[in-house]
Amino acid sequence: MASIELMNQSAPSAEAARLNSQGMLALRAHSFVEAERLFLEATTHDKFSSALWRNVATARRSLGDDKGELQALNAAIDADRRDFMAWLRKAQLHQRTEEKAEALVAWSGVLQMAAQASDLSPEISSALQIGQTFVAEATVQIADAVGAELAPLNATMDEMERRRSSAFVDLALGRRQSFVNNCEGLYYPFLPADEFFDRRHFPWMSQIEAATDDIRTELEALLSDPGDALRPYVKMDAGVPQNKWSELDQSLNWGACFLWEYGQPNQAVLDRCPKTAEALANLPKAMLPGRAPSAFFSILKPRTRIPPHTGVTNTRAIVHLPLLVPENCGFRVGGETRPWQVGRAFAFDDTIEHEAWNDSDENRAILIFDVWNPHLTVVEQDVIVRYYDAADATGFNISR
């Protein structure tokens, strides 16, 4: 893109403006050497004008002076780091001269800047499409090369190493975001902000999976006549303004049957689901009166989505045991999306942004319960229990 760039700085000096006008006349007359001389002289009268340096770059491009054009574009960027056109033309120059690494860096920056802009001209939009294609093709080439290099290591990696190394590569290539904890309540410092916990942390997980058929049978019997056991999971306080939860407020589109709720057993449901109760009783639980454990059947009706959100505390891990999973259901935590598989449990950190959806025509049902975050030591678990015991004893309301 070698269009003439008009001066856009406020109140340029009269002499700089005069020389710039003469330079543009010289450009139109194809007197490129004279145009370069005039634009350069203009910069001596207004050294902070990025537009003048872009005009110098235009003259030098017309002269076929790639090195000089780059120097002028860098001068424009030094004068104004936000000069979008200078960055765009720099990306185009690096791509034209086949400086692949420099072009990738410049185009990536241009596309980030463009994402914040609106009402882009057709000419700019067309140029950006070229940049997007360049970045996409470069990313594929890098990914292929990295994949080939790492392939021999994959067979030697355990679950944690595969997940972390895959996330590292995707993050480095700009194919995913990095997510952090966002606790609505208690935050315990220095715990890893991992999206899904490695299965090796939960040696008991196969036990709960082995009970899947019994648990599903009890759930189906419960749902055939739920009475007041099934209730909306989302219950907003009166007067709360419209928000992302409003569509699910007081709705059985996302329903829950609680077996345990904030450390209190729901005996009526436990009595109707004795094998489920037994399976849960055999698991290690975080016992925090008024807070944990919680365990419930989560029912998501057809064509229902749970919006992206974060949980209360990173001191716990949330476990899903899928029971009824039609096609077109999914679950995302941070940058990783997983399908539910009936009878295959997993654990995740719900203080990292997560969402769920059921795009099928049938109900989706899973058993959800919480346990201690596996990165907490036994002593640290005791610290948390004692903290709440002491704080609650003061008579003040302490957050979950």
Image (cartoon, helix red, strand yellow):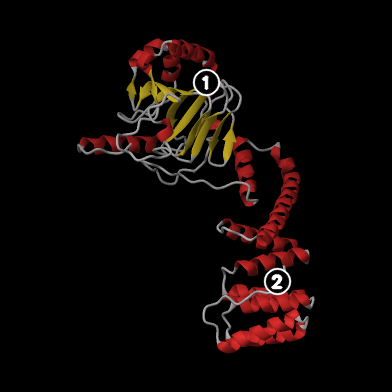
**Separation (CA) of disc 1 from disc 2:** 59 Å
Judging depth in this view, the residue of 340 and 227 nearest the camera is 227
- Residue type at the position of mark 2: Ser
Among the two numbered marks 1 and 2 on one chain, the one whose residue lies closer to the N terminus? 2
Pair 1/2: label in front: 2
Looking at the rendered image, the quarter that the C terminus falls into is: top left
Camera sees residue 99: no
Q: Nearer the viewer, residue 26 or 113?
A: 26
Tell me if 110 is positioned left or right of 310 in this view. Answer: right
Q: Residue furthest bottom?
A: 15
Disc 2, SS: loop
Q: Examine the rendered structure and indicate whether residue 296 appears above or below residue 224.
A: below
Mark 1 Cα within 10 Å, few/some/many (few <14, many 20+)? Answer: some
Instruction: Provide the residue designation for mark 1.
Output: 363
**Pick the front one: 229 or 160:** 229
Q: Residue 165's mark? A: none
Residue 358 in view: yes
Q: x and y percent of residue 297 in the render?
A: 45, 21
Q: Position of residue 119 (x, y in %)?
A: 58, 58
Q: Is residue 226 rendered to the left or right of residue 40?
A: left
Q: Amino acid at mark 1?
A: Asn
Q: Secondary structure at mark 1?
A: loop
Q: In the picture, which quadrant includes the N terminus?
A: bottom right
Which residue in the structure is indicated by mark 2? 3
Q: Residue at x 58, y 56 (%)?
A: 115
Residue 252 placement: quadrant: top left
Q: Position of residue 394 (x, y in %)?
A: 20, 38
Tell me: residue 119, above or below residue 359.
below
Residue sticking out furthest to the left: 395
